[in-house]
Image: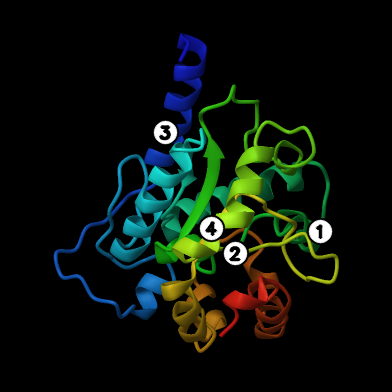
Amino acid sequence: MNRKHFLKISSIASMAALAPFPINLDFSTEISTQELLGKGKPQLYGKDYALRKEANEAFKDMQIDASREGINLYIVSGYRSFKTQQHIWNKKYKTYSKKGLSAQQCIEQIMRYSTIPGTSRHHWGTEIDLIDTAVELPKNVLHPKHYTRNGVFCPLQKWMAKNAANYGFNLVYTNNPKRTGFHYEPWHYSYKELSINYLQKFLEIDLAKYLQNENIKGNSNLTSTFLNRYNQDYLLGIHPRLIP
């Protein structure tokens, strides 16, 4: 690995490390409302990333097997707290707002790829955004073009499409043109054994109640009606295998 490649990986690891990884000594397969919203203190595992125990063990098995075929699975983003998602959302909102977009337009632009704080699947410790560090890394690693045709992560995408389900992982936001919600994310996989139950519990939460007093840009537009549609079109606009 050359120095430039090493520095790029180190930079990605540093960004992932910005998210706080709270540790709780009491492991449980149950999940609280606060944990679903990214505000709890789940027990998390991993190096340069954080996942729930079962998800981490499954990932490590998958990582070992992929390495035998020349693919070095690397998690750019695993667990993400409410605070981190809030920072991502508000930063994007300010950027779009400065371009003259209305509040509703800002929200629509952000929701192409980013979730409303408190609604990210990454809050659950079951999600992974993957790249392959065995290749020369491009700028903006999480871009769909890198995972298709002649993209550097095309071998990664093909390997995951063939093998991920054997380890309990499923692509979340597929390239199905009939799918609603977030844009295609060929890097985002979910550990189904946990996340399918977490999603079922999450859909029972009164989001408007929990989000109304949070410092979220454009919050006044996040009405109960809007959030109900958001749940249906975005949170359920996923791979059918991941729907409860």
Q: Nearer the viewer, residue 5 or 110?
A: 5
Q: Amino acid at mark 3?
A: Ala
Q: Earlier in the sequence, mark 3 or mark 1?
A: 3
- Whichever of labels 3 and 4 marks the residue nearer the N terminus, that label is 3
The label number, if any, that marks residue 135 in the structure image: none
Q: Nearer the viewer, mark 3 or mark 4?
A: 4
Q: Residue at x 68, y 53 (%)?
A: 185
Q: Is residue 201 visible?
A: yes
Q: CA distance from mark 2 to mark 3?
A: 24 Å
The residue to which callout 3 is attached is 13
Q: Which mark is residue 105?
A: 1
Which of the marked residues, 2 or 4, is nearer the chain's N terminus? 2
Dot 3: what SS?
A: helix
Please state which of the two labelled residues, at mark 3 or mark 1, is closer to the viewer.
Answer: 3
Left or right: 231 as drawn, with respect to 130? right
Foreground residue, 115 or 125?
Answer: 125
Give the residue displayed 44% in from the left and 60% down from the top: 82
- The residue indicated by pointer 2 is 116
Give the residue drawn at x 78%, y 71%: 180
* Mark 2 or mark 1, earlier in chain: 1
Q: Taking 221 as reference, is 157 above or below it?
A: above
**Residue 225 left/right relative to 208:** right
The amino acid at mark 2 is Ile
Give the Cα separation between the discs numbered 2 and 4. Answer: 27 Å
Circles 4 and 1, Cβ within 8 Å, touching? The answer is: no
Amino acid type for the residue under numbered disc 1: Gln
**Residue 169 seen in render:** no
Image coords of residue 181 (percent x, y)? 74, 68
Q: Can you tell which quarter of the image residue 179 is in?
A: bottom right
